Image (cartoon, rainbow, N blue to C red):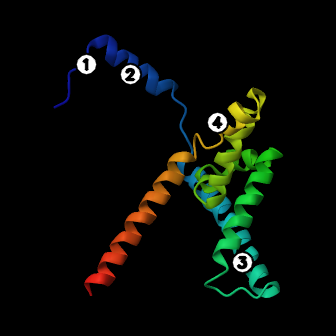
């Protein structure tokens, strides 16, 4: 049930809609798709590099690739490049694993003036802490279900 608006509220809404800037949703989606795709292409290149030069298999190449991509994103965040990429690509730069590295380092950089222990150490996982906790917890639950399933069979 929709509440009836007073005449002043209706006027305000009309004025707000008149002055509201229209966001280019399709263009933003395309930029996010392109930036996210480029990050994934770089990740694939890193995987192929590890498979070719270090004899990793398709099953074992995932961990070093993820670690390398997170390291690259942290390095680029430290130099201020990843933030510019995020302004262009939006969610395309935040969704891949590189967005996690960016979130961790951004919090550390923001609080470095407060010192290494209370500033960096106390705030580095402020944003990414929930992701880490949820990842560990969900991995535990999945492992528990798998273990119980294998015992039952």
Q: Residues within 10 Å of mark 2 (few under 14, many from 20)?
A: few
Q: Measuring from the top left, give residue 137's x and y in whole percent.
A: 43, 58
Nearest the viewer among 15 and 63 is 63
Residue occupying image coordinates x 75% and y 59%: 71
Which one is earlier in the sequence, the residue at label 2 or at label 4? 2
The image's mark for residue 122 is 4
Q: Residues within 10 Å of mark 4 (few under 14, many from 20)?
A: some
For label 2, the SS is helix
Nearest the viewer among 25 and 109 is 109
Q: Label 3: which residue?
A: 47
Q: Label 1: which residue?
A: 5
Q: In this rendering, which labeled residue sits more in front, label 2 or label 4?
A: 4
Q: Quadrant of residue 37?
A: bottom right
Q: Quadrant of residue 43?
A: bottom right
Q: In this rendering, which labeled residue sits more in front, label 3 or label 2?
A: 3
Q: Label 2: which residue?
A: 13
Whether tag 1 and tag 2 are in contact, CB under 8 A, the answer is yes
Whether tag 2 and tag 4 are in contact, CB under 8 A, the answer is no
Nearest the viewer among 138 and 80 is 138
Q: Measuring from the top left, give residue 152's x and y in whole percent.
A: 25, 83
- Which corner quadrant holds the N terminus? top left
Q: In this rendering, which labeled residue sits more in front, label 1 or label 4?
A: 4
What distance separates the C-alpha of mark 1 from that of mark 2? 10 Å
């Amino acid at each position: 049930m929709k509440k009836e608006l007073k005449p002043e509220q209706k006027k305000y809404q009309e004025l707000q809609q008149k002055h509201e800037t229209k966001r280019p949703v399709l263009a933003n989606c395309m930029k996010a798709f392109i930036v996210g795709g480029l990050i994934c292409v770089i990740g694939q290149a890193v995987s192929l590099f590890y498979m070719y030069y270090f004899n990793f298999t398709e099953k074992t190449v995932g961990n070093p690739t993820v670690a390398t991509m997170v390291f690259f994103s942290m390095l680029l965040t430290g130099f201020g490049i990843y933030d510019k990429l995020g302004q262009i690509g939006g969610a395309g730069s935040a969704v891949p694993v590189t967005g996690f590295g960016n979130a961790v380092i951004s919090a550390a950089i923001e609080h470095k003036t407060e010192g290494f222990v209370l500033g960096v150490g106390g705030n580095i996982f402020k944003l990414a802490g929930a992701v880490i906790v949820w990842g560990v917890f969900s991995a535990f639950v999945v492992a528990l279900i798998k273990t119980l399933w294998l015992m039952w069979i």
